[in-house]
């Protein structure tokens, strides 16, 4: 755990985003510090995925600013935005592995397209090394359709790591997985931070995952962050009934 | 951005508004193709793979259909010609019909069904499972990698397939003529080539290029804009077939007008 939050890497201020009449984000403020794992909690449909999609420019906010490494994402040209995107690893909620490619090709794809002049050997070394570190070396020649949900998630994470991102965005990494696989993924998230010195946002409904991986929690309710702090701060002393009910609900389940 | 349009009250009626925004959207999609196609990376490998897929997918059906069309069309045309004792004109008649209209049309309609739907479904499912987003966030241009390559591939492959369909249909026709009028292969093909002009072949190929482009871009457009959910994938596949067939008929009519204007100028 980082002892002090000194270096701010992401600064989100007053971000609003609506889809027609559906006002999803209604003024979001959030900071992410260097080497921190920040957990974002919130009900289904509260706009967690929308928030991280705004960060990488997959969606555009209606109002507010998102600063990443001191750059205002909305003011970047496509070229600069792409440069920024390479520093951000985005692990999708449903893995988003390319169906038509093998695991190896999936992992190589971002690499060969963004890093020039790599030798075959360097590529193989990287891909195999990463597959080893997520514990799935044997899947290398399989198609995504042949993998289980948990395997897909891990390969999805490994794929984002080939470009050695400085920020990782995990969208519900443990959703729909059995408890043991959840533990694997939680460990992987912590291991990634140790190895790559990443700062991460982990979106989850799973409070165990939140507790194990997160340094700070942020609870998104009705389009705004209602509580931000350590796990204990947010939940043990939760005064806000909505935050509290979120906690109770999760642990009674 | 498009918000002010979306937030405001409908300008005419909701349906008409939607139609026109859809049209503008499609137009922008086509424009983007022509903006991006000239610049690297060219993705030759992906284009080649797509060309192969298109050929592989549609060849069996095209062979069968072309062959049968040749036989049936010849057989059905015979009675009207024999009334005037003009069955010796059969090869010429058939060749004009096939090269000018049947070949391109049959090929394009089959490709719209087989290739267009699979492009729509493939890109649609990549869209709804966020694979397209995944490309975007790893700084890969999905439009270039998916849309440009597939559209180039269909545009190149349809003319080639049309030539092949023409050939197979003529073989079918020859078999029928050979059985009934005892015309030899060489006589048949001499008559076939005498009947058609450079303009016929050239315009047929240009038309096929347009058909191919239509099939590719429509499939990609429908897939790229498919709404979320697996249901959207089926819809995208279906809509790309309907839309490209409709456009192919319109283009056929336009081509007829243009070629006639040139021919009789
Ligand atoms: N591209 C889009 N177009 C229209 N509406 C959208 C779009 N993306 C998200 N939404 C809407 O925004 C809201 C928030 O969606 P989001 O995916 O961020 O939820 P979430 O918090 O990630 O939920 P979950 O935990 O289920 O993943 C939803 O109501 C959704 O319908
Ligand atoms: Mg989500």
Image (cartoon, coloured by chain):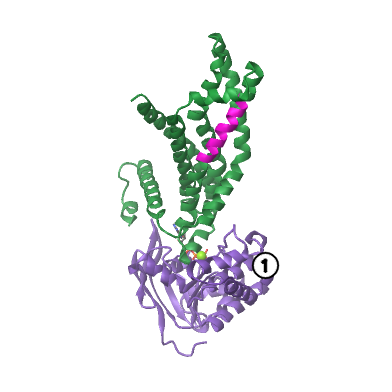
Chain colours: A purple, B green
What is the x, y in percent for residue A66?
Answer: 37, 72
Q: Is residue B101 magenta?
A: no
Q: Chain of mark 1?
A: A
In this orientation, which residue lies closer to the viewer: A84 or A243? A84
The quadrant where residue B67 appears:
top right
Q: Is residue A211 above or below residue A77?
A: below
Q: Is residue B163 magenta?
A: yes
Q: Is mark 1 within 8 Å of ligand 2?
A: no
Extent of the magenta region: B159-173
Q: Main secondary structure of the magenta part?
A: helix
**How many residues crowd around disc 1 within 10 Å: few (fewer than 14), some, or many (20 or more)?**
some
Give the residue at the far bottom of this rendering. Answer: A3
Q: Is residue B112 above or below residue A210?
A: above
Q: Secondary structure at mark 1?
A: helix
The quadrant where residue A128 appears:
bottom right
Q: Give the residue displayed 38% in from the left and 28% down from the top.
A: B257
Q: Give the residue displayed 44% in from the left and 87% down from the top.
A: A5
Q: Which residue is mark 1?
A: A139
In this orientation, which residue lies closer to the viewer: B82 or A246? B82
Give the residue at the far right of this rendering. Answer: A138
In this orientation, which residue lies closer to the viewer: B75 or B121? B75
The quadrant where residue B262 appears:
top left
Quadrant (top left, top right, bottom left, bottom right) of the C terminus of chain A: bottom right
Q: Give the residue displayed 41% in from the left and 53% down from the top.
A: B37
What is the x, y in percent for residue A85?
Answer: 44, 70
What is the x, y in percent for residue B45?
Answer: 53, 56
Q: Is residue B10 above or below residue A174?
A: above
> Is residue B94 in view from this perspective?
no
What is the x, y in percent for residue B94?
Answer: 54, 23
């Amino acid at each position: 755990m980082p002892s002090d939050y000194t270096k701010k890497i992401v600064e989100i201020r007053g971000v609003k985003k609506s889809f027609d009449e559906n006002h999803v984000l209604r003024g979001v403020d959030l900071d992410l510090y260097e080497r921190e794992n920040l957990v974002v909690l919130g009900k289904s449909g509260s706009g967690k995925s929308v928030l991280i999609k705004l960060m990488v420019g997959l969606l555009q906010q209606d109002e507010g600013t998102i600063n990443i490494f001191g750059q205002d994402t909305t003011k970047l040209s496509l070229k600069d935005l792409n440069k920024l995107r390479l520093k951000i690893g985005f692990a999708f909620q449903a893995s988003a592995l390319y169906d038509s490619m093998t695991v190896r090709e999936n992992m190589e794809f971002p690499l060969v397209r963004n890093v020039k002049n790599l030798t075959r050997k360097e590529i193989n070394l990287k891909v195999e090394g990463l597959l080893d570190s997520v514990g799935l070396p044997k899947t290398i020649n399989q198609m995504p359709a042949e993998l289980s949900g948990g395997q897909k998630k891990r390969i999805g994470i490994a794929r984002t790591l080939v470009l050695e991102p400085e920020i990782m965005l995990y969208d519900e990494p443990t959703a729909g997985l059995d408890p043991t696989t959840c533990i694997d993924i939680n460990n992987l998230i912590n291991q990634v931070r140790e190895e790559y010195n990443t700062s991460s946002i982990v979106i989850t409904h799973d409070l165990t995952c939140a507790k194990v991986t997160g340094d700070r929690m942020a609870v998104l309710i009705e389009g705004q962050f209602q509580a931000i702090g350590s796990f204990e701060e947010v939940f043990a002393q939760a005064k806000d009934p909505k935050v509290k009910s979120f906690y109770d609900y999760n642990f009674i389940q | 951005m498009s918000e002010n349009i979306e937030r405001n009250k409908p300008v005419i009626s909701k349906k008409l508004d939607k139609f026109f925004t859809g049209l503008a959207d499609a137009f922008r999609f086509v424009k983007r193709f022509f903006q991006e196609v000239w610049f690297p990376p060219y993705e030759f490998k992906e284009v080649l793979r797509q060309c192969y897929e298109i050929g592989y997918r549609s060849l069996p059906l095209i062979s069968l259909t072309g062959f049968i069309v040749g036989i049936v069309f010849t057989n059905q045309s015979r009675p009207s010609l024999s009334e005037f004792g003009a069955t010796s004109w059969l090869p010429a008649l058939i060749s004009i019909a096939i090269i000018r209209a049947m070949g391109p049309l049959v090929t394009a309609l089959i490709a719209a069904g087989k290739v267009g739907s699979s492009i729509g479904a493939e890109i649609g499912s990549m869209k709804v499972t966020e694979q397209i987003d995944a490309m975007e966030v790893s700084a890969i241009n999905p439009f270039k990698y998916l849309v440009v390559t597939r559209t180039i591939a269909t545009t190149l492959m349809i003319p080639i397939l049309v030539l092949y369909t023409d050939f197979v249909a003529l073989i079918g026709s020859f078999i029928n003529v050979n059985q009934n009028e005892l015309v030899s292969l060489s006589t048949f093909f001499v008559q076939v080539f005498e009947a058609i002009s450079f303009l016929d072949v050239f315009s047929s190929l240009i038309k096929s290029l347009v058909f191919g482009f239509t099939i590719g871009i429509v499939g990609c457009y429908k897939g790229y804009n498919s709404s979320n959910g697996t249901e959207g994938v089926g819809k995208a596949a279906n809509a790309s077939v309907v839309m490209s067939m409709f456009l192919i008929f319109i283009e056929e009519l336009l081509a007829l007008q243009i070629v006639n204007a040139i021919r009789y100028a």
